[in-house]
Amino acid sequence: AQSVTQLGSHVSVSEGALVLLRCNYSSSVPPYLFWYVQYPNQGLQLLLKYTTGATLVKGINGFEAEFKKSETSFHLTKPSAHMSDAAEYFCAVSDLNKLIFGTGTRLQVFP
Amino acid sequence: NAGVMQNPRHLVRRRGQEARLRCSPMKGHSHVYWYRQLPEEGLKFMVYLQKENIIDESGMPKERFSAEFPKEGPSILRIQQVVRGDSAAYFCASSPRDGSTDTQYFGPGTRLTVL
């Protein structure tokens, strides 16, 4: 069965610093992978997704993620954090018609 | 194009009452998914429906929970005889085709509080 592990339930960075949120997956088939962001009391918004093709995926708000099959990873990065990036981030893998989510990483950005 | 609509946004029920959560998918979307988010946890899949059909209910509790997506009108998630453990945020998502590769678009959620 598919599963997702997000290392680090909380990550804190300074404004302008690199953001790195980790995601490892387990999948018996080629995975389809997603990153979603959730702002307080709101629904989830898709940041980016990987299905096939180029392993470096660019998303909205300057985020990108790289699919590394050998490491079963799909880490999310952003070169320079902004205060508005403070939110909860969820990695997910597709399992037939449903998404399997990690437990989330809460990103804090300090001025 | 309006996004996924959910109502109510907040719902308070006493133990033993019924809760009805509504979800209107994005225009043109015929696939609906329900997820539950318990406090401090990620989202957990509950059920996947197409118009008038339940396709996958593997995440639904066996008792008290039911879902439907009629030919006309919104999808409904119904919880009978609610208990405190049902307190959670319930999210609906929709997609134009099956969700294996297609993006699922999420609504703002319904936050259920059981007193």
Image (cartoon, coloured by chain):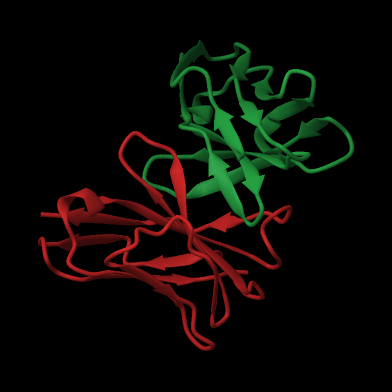
Q: Residue at x 59, y 57 (%)?
A: B105
* Chain letter, colour red in render: B
The residue closer to the viewer here, B96 or B66, is B66
The residue closer to the viewer here, A72 or B30, is A72
User: Chain A, which colour?
Assistant: green
Q: Residue at x 73, y 42 (%)?
A: A32
Q: Position of residue B9 (x, y in %)?
A: 32, 61
Where's the C terminus of chain B, which quadrant?
bottom left
Q: Quadrant of residue A74?
A: top right
Is A88 positioned to the left or the right of A82 in the image? Answer: left
Q: Position of residue A80 (x, y in %)?
A: 64, 17
Q: Residue at x 53, y 35 (%)?
A: A90
Q: Position of residue B6 (x, y in %)?
A: 41, 66
Where's the N terminus of chain B, which quadrant?
bottom right
Q: Quadrant of residue B15?
A: bottom left
Is A34 positioned to the left or the right of B11 in the image? Answer: right
